[in-house]
Structures are given as C-alpha cells and as structure tokens.
Image: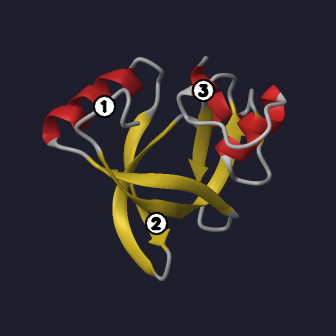
Amino acid sequence: MSVRFPASKFIADARVNGYLYDLGAFPGLLLSQAASSVIGEVYEVDDETLDQLDRFEASTNYLRKQVDISLGDGRMMCWTYTPTAEFCSTGTLITSGDWLEHARIKTGRPGKVSPEETQR
C-alpha cells in the first residue's frame, strides 16, 4: 500500500473474521463472525488518502465497512473494503486466509510476494 499511497503508515499485521476469495488480480473479503481468520495489514492514513482509497475501491464495486480486528493480543476498529457476496461467488475460496501466500503459490514464485506483485 505504501507504494501506491506513500502517505500511509504501516501499523501492524492483523486478523479479521471472514472468508477470503481469489477474484483474479485482487482478493475479496466477506466478513463473518463464524468464519476463520483472514490475514491482513493495518495502515494509518490521512483523510485525503482515505478519499483516494474510496474512489479507487468504488470503481471496483468494493464498499468501505468498519470492522473489529485482532492485532496480536489487542483489538481495534478499522476500515476495510469488501465486495458483495454475489461478486465473491465467482471466486475461489482461499482456505488459508492469506492472500500473499496464495499469490505466491498461484504464481509459482518462491518466497514472499509483495502486494504490488499480485497486481501485475
């Protein structure tokens, strides 16, 4: 995220309850309290960056939602973007809940794959 939005500041790795789907170049998160954990990252952004993210995500039919996440031993409320359930129905469930791990396996690349590489 920091490449596309340089004003963002990485806070921590996080987990949220839901299902993660492979929708091609991007993942789709369906929030669910009954689901397994989805792995992600938390960034602090200013209002201008949040507006840019809203415009970018709106163009892909993702909506911003507030969600309770886990940060190690703590919890906090954060924003996330989620597609509609119908949109995710066309994707493949990522059982690990880890988009970067899934992308590494999918592309056959050893080691870690950065978020920017998954968009190529």
Q: Residues within 10 Å of mark 1 (few under 14, many from 20)?
A: few
- Horizontally, residue 104 falls left or right of residue 54, namely right
- Horizontally, residue 48 falls left or right of residue 13, namely left
Image mark for residue 97: none
Nearest to viewer (mark 1 / mark 2)? 1
Q: Quadrant of residue 111?
A: top right
Q: Which residue carries the number 2 mark?
A: 69
Q: Earlier in the sequence, mark 2 or mark 3?
A: 2
Circles 2 and 3 in contact, beta carbons < 8 Å? no
Looking at the rendered structure, the secondary structure element under dot 3 is helix
The CA span between labels 2 and 3 is 25 Å
Q: Which residue carries the number 3 mark?
A: 117
Q: Which quadrant of the figure contains the C terminus?
A: top right
Q: Earlier in the sequence, mark 1 or mark 3?
A: 1
In front here: 34 or 69? Answer: 69
Task: Name the amino acid type tagged 3.
Answer: Glu
Q: Residue at x 55, y 63 (%)?
A: 15
Question: In the image, residue 98 lies at what x, y percent?
Answer: 68, 50
Q: Which residue carries the number 1 mark?
A: 5
Q: Residues within 10 Å of mark 3 (few under 14, many from 20)?
A: few
Looking at the rendered structure, the secondary structure element under dot 1 is loop
Task: Name the amino acid type tagged 1.
Answer: Phe
Task: Name the amino acid type tagged 2.
Answer: Ile
Q: Residue at x 36, y 70 (%)?
A: 76
- Residue extending farthest to the bottom is 73
The CA span between labels 1 and 3 is 15 Å
Q: Residue at x 63, y 28 (%)?
A: 87
* 35, above or below 19, in the image: below
Q: Earlier in the sequence, mark 1 or mark 2?
A: 1
In front here: 45 or 56? Answer: 45
